[in-house]
Image: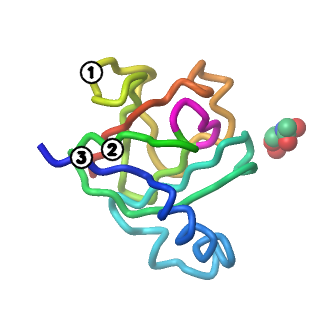
Amino acid sequence: MAKYAFTALFTLFAAQALAAPSANPIEKRTPGGIYICTDINWSGECGYKVQPLNTCIHLDDPWYHTISSFGPDQGTSCQMYSDKNCNFPIGSGIGYPGVADMTKDGLNDQVGAFKCHT
Ligand SMILES: *[C@@H]1O[C@H](CO)[C@@H](O)[C@H](O)[C@H]1NC(C)=O
C-alpha cells in the first residue's frame, strides 16, 4: 500500500499556505485538507496539505509525535493513531474546525499517523 507523508518539502509549501490562511476560502472546504501545528493554539511550526482520504498518513520529522493543534477542513474527519502505521487508534476522532489544544484530550505530542474520511 502506498504511503503518504508530511515531509520536509511540504514545509516549504506550508509557508505559502500560512501567508493568508483566511484569504483562501476554497481550501477551507477541501476534503482531505489538514492544517497542523507543533504548538497549541495554531502556533509553532504549522503546515497545510490536502491528503488522500481513507489512507494512513504517517507523520515524519518535524511532525511525528509533536503536533498540538489539528484542523481538518470542512467535511473532513480524522482518526489519530499513536504509531506510524495506523495500528493503534487514540482519541475519538477530530472533525472541522479541529482542536486548537490537544493537551485537553490527551493527544498532545502523541500522534504518529492519522486517517481521514468525509
Ligand atoms: C490558547 O487559547 C485559549 C483560548 O483562546 C487561551 O485561553 C489560552 O490562554 C491560550 N494558550 C496559549 C498558551 O496561548
Tell me, for residue 3, which label it has, or none. 3
In the image, residue 65 above or below residue 97:
above
Whether residue 32 is in magenta: the answer is: no
| Side (left or right) of 87 relative to 6 | left
In the image, residue 115 above or below residue 83:
below
Location of residue 93 in the rendering, given as x and y in whole percent from the top left corner? 41, 32
The tag earlier along the polypeptide, 1 or 2, is: 2
Residue drawn at x 63%, y 31% is 102
| Kind of residue sitting beneath label 3 | Lys
Q: Which structural element holds mark 3?
A: loop
**Residue tagged 2:** 57
Q: Which structural element holds mark 2?
A: strand
| Kind of residue sitting beneath label 1 | Asn
Residue drawn at x 31%, y 40% is 115
| Side (left or right) of 99 relative to 76 | right
Location of residue 118 in the rendering, given as x and y in whole percent from the top left corner? 27, 52
Looking at the rendering, the quadrant in which ligand 1 lies is top right
Q: Which structural element holds mark 1?
A: loop
Q: Are marks 3 and 2 in contact (CB under 8 Å)?
A: no
In which quadrant is the N terminus drawn?
top left
Label 1 Cα crowd, 10 Å radius (few <14 / some 14-19 / many 20+): few
| Kind of residue sitting beneath label 2 | Ile
Residue drawn at x 35%, y 30% is 84
In the image, which residues are magenta?
64-69
Tell me, for residue 87, which label it has, or none. 1
